[in-house]
Image (cartoon, grey):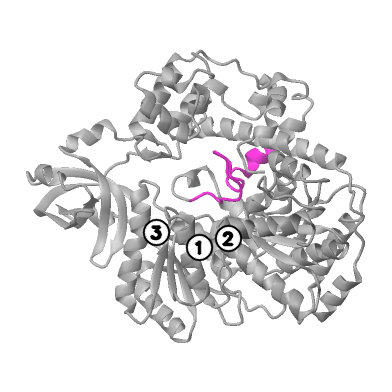
Amino acid sequence: MNKLTPVHELKGIGEKTEKLFLKLGICTVGDLLGYYPRGYDIYEEAVPVSELEEGKVQTVTGAIFGRVQVSGNRAMQVTTIHVKDITGTLKVVWFRMPFLRTTLAKGGVITLRGLVSRKKSGLVMEHPEMFYPSARYEEKLHTMQPVYPLTGGLSNNTVMKAVRQALDEMPLERELLPEGLRLRCHLAEYNYAVRGIHFPEDKEVYFQARNRLVFEEFAQFICSLRALREEKDRARNHFGIRPAPGVDAFIRALPYELTGAQKKVWEEILGDMQKDVSMSRLVQGDVGSGKTVIALLALLTAALNGFQGALMAPTEVLAKQHYESVTAMLARHGIPVRTELLTGSMTAKEKRDVYSRMEDGTAQIIIGTHALIQEKAVYRNLALVVTDEQHRFGVKQREKLAGKGEMPHVLVMSATPIPRTLAIILYGDLDISVIDELPANRLPIKNCVVDTSYRPTAYRFIEKQVAQGRQCYIICPMVEESEHLEVENVTDYAAMLQEELGGDICVACLHGKMKQEQKDGIMEQFGSGQIQVLVSTTVIEVGINVPNATVMMVENAERFGLAQLHQLRGRVGRGEHQSYCIFMTGSHDQETKERLDILNKSNDGFKIAAEDLKLRGPGDLFGIRQSGLMNFRLGDVFQDAKLLKMASEAVASPEAAGSEWLKKLEAHAGTASVIL
């Protein structure tokens, strides 16, 4: 057996199971070993009922108290019991498991492990793992069990068994990392790391394994950036773009003056478009700093020079908003530049018409989603592509664009402020501009960090804001233990809140398991004001601009990193009205309160990012969501900033030059798992 062995050759994987593995992109044993757990069930000591904390996965032992209840309809049956110890009583519920009634009706002492949440009736443990009799829990106490991302029909146990078999039967791989480099960076041996990431004996083994694999992942990413930088340096500028008088007139006619930072960045972009090589620039700026108008100036310059420009947005809703905003601005200033919208949900005829105008050059600015780089999208003379950080162009995408004509200028917009030292490594293929100044008329968001006792007051405040014509977001953290619980978390909360706020206020929910058209429909209704309160997971982090939304309330704020909380906060404060952000935490931990207090005191994303960098440590891997800045399989750029710097230095070191390790990384550079 080797890494190229098909997964169906493992015992217990038949044709049906193989298809499920293929859905996850697992074709070979090598793919399987690279399919890392998304988390671990850490079986810790049971706590008394009185010490349970909202938002945490915990274990409790007690006696089954009272009778077992099964309620609901056939589609959603809810089994409920109460468990009691000497400190209190806990309500426990399971979804779609009515068969548990027979076992639970016997009574006695039971151990349960699950997510603790707060409902109207108090703390509830949802869909817990059950150990009955309680002595069975002793077998798992203090162990770490891997939890894998799954697809319907595939169990965690099936993946675990397959991985264990592969590890036991695969011959050891030769260590390619130069020994001196490995020892200097305190990195585990490769085979130890692969076994340790899947089946760690304890947290220390896990950290050692993860550090080695994150280091390797970052090193491969940096090799990819080096390849992109070399490609950029070879990409000649064929467009001959010059400053356009119409753009200067447009700037003078704006109802506000550009900030000093905006003017500086615009000069850098305009200079890039006149150089001998194509532009590859990142514009980094906090939410509300005015990146979009800078992007429009660049697109307008390309159009007025007789070329085409494309703006790629992360969602259809945002693409439509950009399109409406741009067309309105151009019409208001009498600028004869034709703008088109291209998204995946358009009809075949609508797409054909847009494709035709793109190909003959009638369409000068094209705004859309990933549909902009599909095979049927042919441009007459595409000179500029502006893209959101979620859609950074990797090698394959650049090849697609190059195939549509000469290599265009690329401008990447990022609303995630990160310290410059980190940005230089992460965006090694791009020149970096920073808009570090907010418009003078921008009202700062008012923040507060509160515990759960403040929730009724928060609801009354939301009612007052809605009565004044405003709108509100409430964010629930995603529940990773179960896809069903994520959905239930927001739907149940939305139903509870609708009852709390009354029928005059429209409450809706949004979560990641919805189809894209459902998400877009709800976001459009929220954007138009039909929905006043939106209960959502972090799917709204990128995607919609609602100037009328003035309240952002984040439940279980302690479960997010500071950078992500700041991004969420950026959904409000976009209009003329005063905006507010309420960070609600169920944690009584002093360090958690100090960390959240940074957000309480500052709206400066760059300052918050720097503090996040200082505070995030390996212990945060258990409980705090990753930053989401880039789609690494294991690494997190804030949490693992030291490893990122170490990997960057290692790739450039004389020790690595010419080594088999570096050659292997460079060979796989174009297939790095991270979105470039």
Say which amino acid is labelled 3. Ser
Disc 2, SS: helix
Q: Give 417 or 330, whichever is nearer the viewer.
A: 330
| Magenta region | 625-646
217 relative position to 514: left or right: right
What whole-number distance in Å separates the C-alpha atoms at marks 2 and 1? Answer: 7 Å
Residue 520's mark?
Answer: 1
Q: Which residue is mark 3?
A: 587
Q: Give 437 or 329, whichever is nearer the viewer.
A: 329
Q: State which quadrant residue 307 falls in.
A: bottom right
Disc 1, SS: helix
Instruction: Answer yes or no: is residue 49 visible.
Output: yes
Residue 434 image offset from top left, x and y in percent: 76, 60
Mark 3 Cα-neighbour bin, 10 Å: few <14, some 14–19, many ≥20? some
Residue 316's mark?
Answer: 2
449 relative position to 356: left or right: left
Q: Residue at x 74, y 59 (%)?
A: 357
Label 2 close to label 1 by CB (< 8 Å): yes
Q: Residue at x 77, y 32 (%)?
A: 652
Disc 3, SS: loop
Vertical comparison of 676 with 469: above or below: above
Q: Residue at x 28, y 55 (%)?
A: 51
**Mark in the foreground, 2 or 3:** 2
